[in-house]
Image (spheres, helix red, strand yellow):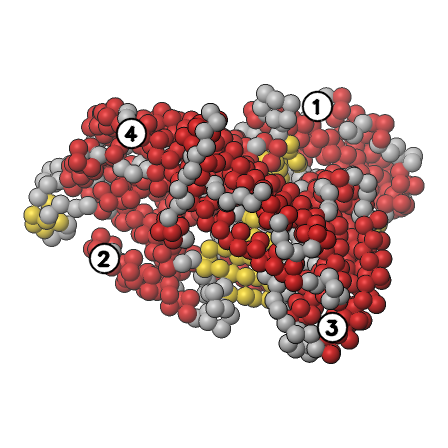
Amino acid sequence: MTTMANIVSSEDFPAYIKEHRNVPRYDQSREERAPHAWWALDKAKIVERLKIIADAVCEVIPEATKGDKELLHMRRTADGLKNIPYGPPVKVALIGPQGAGKSKLINALFGQDGLSLTGDDGKACTSSIIRYAQRGPSSTTDATYIAEIAFMSTKDIEKMCETHARAYFAVQHADEDSEDEDGPKRKSVEQDEADERAKHTAQEVFNTIFQDEDSFARAWSSEKYCTGEFVGHCVLACEKLLNTLERIRDRSGVARLVAEKPKDLLEKIKPFIAKVEDEFSLWALVEKITIRFHNPLLEQNIEIWDLPGWGDTNTDRTRYIEGIKAIVDVEIIAADTIRIASEDVVITNVQAAALNHGLSNVKVVATKIDVIDMVQLFQCSGPRYDELKALIEATEAQINLAGDEDVPAKSDTLDKFRTYLERKLVQREIMDRTQHISKELASKLNGPGPNDVLQSFHVSAVSYMSWLKKEKIMFRDQPALSPHDTGIPGLREYLFSLRADLNLDECARHVFWNVPYYIDKLRRASNNDERDVGFRDLADTFDKLREEFIPKMMVHLKATYTRHLNKALQKMASDFSFYKGQVNTMVEKVWVELKAPGFSKVLKSNGAVKAGNSRAKGLENGCDWNMDLVNIFTPAFKKWDNFQSKALLDFDIRLREGFDTFHLNLMDLMDHSASTVHTAEKAKSRYTLVRQGVQAGLGGLIQKMSTKHGLLLRHAIQDDGRKNGLMASLTDPIFDEVFKALPKVKRNNGKRDIYETPKIRFQKNKLKTIFTDDNYHFADREYSADLRSLSPHLYVVTQEGMEIRSKLQTLLPQLEEIAESMRQDFPDGVTDQLGQYGTQRELDLDPVFDTSSKKRKRKGQEVKIKQETGLKQNRLR
């Protein structure tokens, strides 16, 4: 906190300004990391020694070695030994409203100006999903920056065009919202902000697809929309546009652009990110853009996903973004400092993210913390401000006096001192404001537990980048906030810490397991006595056992999960007569009772209208038909949840018991194998770590299933505040069908068609039929689909091969010495986390999965279970 004690006095300021007249550019590479063994480890040294081992083997085994599959395998494996095999990256989603400064934040996090499209580039909103990832070692280009642009599939393009065409049609035909075909027409309710935004977005998309307004106007008509012809034209136009990119697209359809500087790459991909005036733009057809480059943050196996700002009118695109949020590991929600604690949409998104990932994996970033109105700043009162303002006023008086005395040097020093004091005043306001925002966010979002504490960051990306622009930053150009106080280093430190544990573990596994195992394989390859037939026989038998186990296991697991799921659905179905009555009442007494303008407005909006977004009678407080249905069916969904939770526990037990059965059979196989005792024991020691990895993987699998189960429930009951849930995916096609339904035309009055039945009345009757028809009632439909988601070779050793093997034997002691030196670099305790290295039963899984047989076995009865038929196994495949 800034206090008077740490403010330089006017007497000491000449010495201060001498030291701070110009300061060197901020060096982010010298930032300290949170204490962790991963940062203390000399990774460059380990990689260097891995390369020495690999290169030494490749030098002994030439590429021209032919016919000796064993040596060729050892050479190929050596190349892979150079790189530590890290697991899946930690995915971080950056989300927030339009204009929150996310793009500037990304530039600051990577310390590279021009990497992300900002408002300064002429477009305030990034319209495409952008993923920032590390360049892979197998990249085929030497360019520093690579952009991989993936486009929508034909099916997704068709859905997008249908969504926007629907919105455009709704606005064009708003005057038809009447139940009286022959009576006087009243003007439709004034189009609200949401309608205008949807119409504007649709026009932008179609102008992009058809390349200009005139071509779009020629392709569009209400009749063509209702018959589907217009959407067909759109799809063909999109295919034609994508064909123009054949030169830069690969076989998978991904376009690649490269550049040596981030600004040059940004200029190339700008038309794929957002609409660019007077340029050929394809942003509307882009699924996502991946930008690859080397960066210390990305090198930690971390990916940053920049998602478009809130407010997208395309429901299918919104659902796709929601799907990305569900698979990421961390959500960072950024918003302007002025609005972050007061806007409901920020709070709602944080709560939804916390439900999906846990509060510890959700961070809030308040941006633009140093955007302060100086007039308002000088109106702040209180001891903390009054003292500084008094100093500033006294300094201004001294400046005037020095001006009268015509002492330029003194005036210049005093002028800098005033600037220094004003910066301190700004710092105090920023500190007070950040503390107030943090407390307000905590009061709204912190949970009851000690770990349910929201972590917030307060940043200024603009000030941070000011410290990177020049080699030397003059005093007049220095921001009020130091690099550390901009908050960017603190946020970056958090990101760096995300994968430290995993990286250390994976690096240790490579050094403590992969490298010794590879050296042992080299020893066996170079020694005919150890490369015996017994080992190959053992490997063949293991493969046979594995091939027998996997299909059986999959059949049983599928049957177990299906049995529990069917029980849950049967329990839900027993109450469906009650749900039918509830749906009938809701549709007949509430939905179709809306007047024509309100009814049409709800259909246009896919069943949901926010309060204040429409002046139609009956919609003053808004409505949400999907939530009406969710509230009806929530008891059923919770019954499903209860059954599935029990099923997961049963599934976990049976999955582990199934693998234990495999383990016992494998141990028995090794004990009774034809191989030597030495070979069998070596096989057992190598299998030990494999077993530990599988057991850990089983626990991770159940955890993922449990997480997915929770996501499915929230998707169904929508308790996270998000609107694009299960019910919306079911009702959107229905609302669309009703909205497009038109009665037979009776006549045309010269201006428009007159229908035999009033259009709105016809649509209301169709809605009632779809939802309440006894033969195909909404409550009877199938929801389960929306609730489900999961050897050695024989060869002849040639004379050349014998000579190479002799060289390998000579090389082995040197390789073992290097491998041991790498292990010594790891801190104590790492090896403890990795674990220790080092009667014939029929493979019968039925007792594990058959509950009745388990009960009989507990009573001491011997049960023989018939094995699964081949037909069932083939069906599973």
Query: The disc labelled 4 sits on which kind of residue?
Result: Ala
Precedes in sequence: disc 1 or disc 4: 1
663 or 728: which is nearer to us?
663
Residue 381 is tagged as 1
**Helix, strand or loop for disc 2:** helix
The amino acid marked with disc number 2 is Lys
Q: Is residue 653 above or below residue 218?
A: above
Looking at marks 3 and 4 on the same chain, the residue that comes earlier in the sequence is marked by 3
Q: Amino acid at mark 3?
A: Ile
Write the residue at 49% across / 30% down: 649
Q: Nearer the viewer, residue 37 or 505?
A: 505
Label number found at residue 224: 2
Determine which of the numbered discs, if any, sits on residue 61 in the image: 3
Q: Cα distance, mark 3 to mark 1?
A: 78 Å
Q: Earlier in the sequence, mark 3 or mark 1?
A: 3
Disc 2 crowd rating (10 Å Cα; few below 14, some 14-19, many 20+) is some
The residue to which callout 4 is attached is 573
